[in-house]
Image: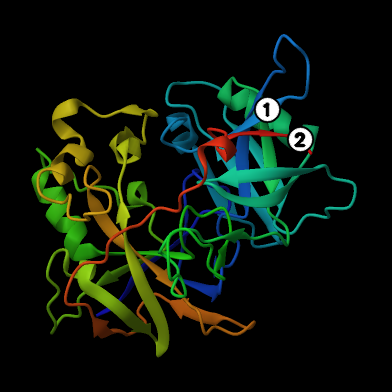
């Protein structure tokens, strides 16, 4: 088995950047999900500060119309917005490691996991607001980290206690790993000849069988550990899927009901007893023993499965007291 594809998503929920090689650190691939877009909501009629809602592609499908690429000449990110119908294409250049002095810090809560983020300011906000048609702010993670909640992290003992593992603005783990074999199995379920777009499933690493090897669909459900070019990656939980994979990336609208991948997975892929109504595709990975230098992973690197579980893992969500939950709305601190 070998690495077939590598993907990073500097701004969460936008189109990925396809790479031949990337450095991977304990919190994930270099520059992966270090920026986040937030929808700024006006103060209530009783006054107060604005509130901010994290923008995930599930609720803001038009985010798929933004393309990202690293500039070769400088450590910057180019973001390009291409509307589905003839219209104005817009571009923005963002420093990958911006200076944070003087930027407003804001508490960010994502999937009940908290960190601090830096608001990048009005010049960046104006670009995304013009493209999206809603008041939008761009937030940079900086040196802050989010704790991994639930039982997903390698050192998690119970779901009511945070682990020591940390991540960026990625949903649950530093790495999401998928296989080409399982993608083929999903594509075969969708009417027509069009192959399922792997980027809708948001993996960081896609694995494929070698010419003289075999890889069964969904066998990754049982992987406990893999080694990529000799580096161990602990596989701790299966990835539960939502309606975000039903988005037509050409238009930003849902695909026709008869071709929705989520429905195809719902037939027999609701295999995680911890989340019975969500189908599984892909598996989360951690690098608990990784040093500060990290590792470099390249397309073509050899991958072996060094541990297999007898049973599927069970996703267990981190529970917060009801009084502390805020439905994803954040205020300036």
The crowding category of the residue bearing disc 2, from other C-alpha atoms within 10 Å (few below 14, some 14 to 19, many at least 20), is few
Q: Measuring 72% from the left and 28% from the top, which residue is drawn there? A: 126
- Seen from the viewer's position, the closer of residues 329 and 211 is 329
Q: Position of residue 244 (x, y in %)?
A: 35, 38
| Residue at the extreme bottom of the image, as rendered | 230
Viewer-side residue, 333 vs 78: 333
Identify the residue at image location x=44%, y=77%.
Answer: 298
Comes first in the chain, label 1 or label 2? 1
SS for tag 2?
A: loop
Name the colour scheme. Answer: rainbow
Labelled disc at residue 51: 1
Specify whether 7 is left or right of 79. Answer: left
Q: Is residue 123 left or right of residue 252?
A: right
Image quadrant in which the N terminus is located: bottom left
Q: Which mark is residue 263?
A: none
Q: Dividing the image into 4 quarters, which one contains the C terminus?
A: top right
- Residue 143 as seen in the image, left or right of residue 222: right
Quadrant for residue 228, please give it: bottom left
Q: Residue at x 71, y 48 (%)?
A: 117
Is 89 above or below relative to 276? above
Rendered residue at 61%/38% (across/down)? 37
Residue contact at pointers 1 and 2, CB within 8 angstroms: no
- In the structure shown, which secondary structural element does the residue marked by tag 1 occupy? strand
Label 1 and label 2: CA atoms lie apart by: 7 Å
Q: Residue 286 at what x, y percent from top left?
A: 45, 73
Q: Residue 332, which numbered label?
A: 2
Image location of residue 269, percent across then percent down: 15, 51
Outermost residue toward the right? 102
């Amino acid at each position: 088995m070998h690495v077939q594809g590598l993907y990073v998503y500097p701004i969460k929920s936008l189109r990925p950047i396809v790479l031949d090689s990337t450095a991977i650190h304990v919190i994930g691939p270099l520059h992966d999900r270090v920026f986040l877009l937030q929808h700024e909501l006006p103060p209530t009629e009783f006054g107060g500060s604005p509130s901010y809602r994290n923008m995930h592609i599930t609720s803001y499908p038009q985010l798929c119309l933004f393309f990202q690429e690293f500039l070769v000449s400088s450590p910057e990110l180019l973001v390009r917005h291409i509307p589905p119908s003839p219209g104005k294409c817009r571009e923005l250049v963002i420093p990958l490691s911006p200076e944070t002095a003087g930027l407003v810090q804001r508490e960010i809560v994502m999937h009940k996991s908290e960190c601090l983020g830096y608001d990048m300011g009005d010049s960046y906000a104006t670009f995304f607001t013009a493209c999206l048609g809603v008041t939008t702010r761009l937030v940079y993670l900086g040196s802050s980290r989010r704790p991994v909640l639930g039982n997903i992290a390698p050192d998690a003992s119970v779901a009511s206690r945070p682990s020591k593992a940390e991540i960026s603005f990625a949903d649950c783990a530093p790495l999401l790993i998928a296989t080409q074999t399982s993608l083929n199995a999903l594509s075969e379920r969708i009417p027509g000849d069009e192959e399922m777009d792997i980027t809708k499933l948001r993996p960081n690493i896609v694995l494929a069988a070698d010419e003289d090897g075999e890889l069964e669909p969904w066998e990754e459900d049982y992987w406990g550990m893999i080694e990529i070019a000799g580096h161990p990656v602990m596989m701790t939980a299966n990835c539960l899927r939502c309606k975000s994979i039903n988005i037509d990336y050409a238009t930003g609208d849902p695909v026709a009901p008869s071709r929705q991948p989520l429905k195809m997975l719902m037939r027999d892929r609701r295999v995680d007893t911890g989340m019975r109504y969500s189908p599984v595709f892909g598996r989360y990975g951690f690098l608990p023993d990784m040093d500060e230098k990290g590792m470099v992973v390249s397309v073509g690197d050899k991958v072996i499965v060094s541990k297999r579980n007898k049973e599927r893992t069970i996703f267990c969500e981190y529970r917060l007291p009801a009084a502390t939950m805020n439905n994803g709305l954040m205020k300036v601190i």
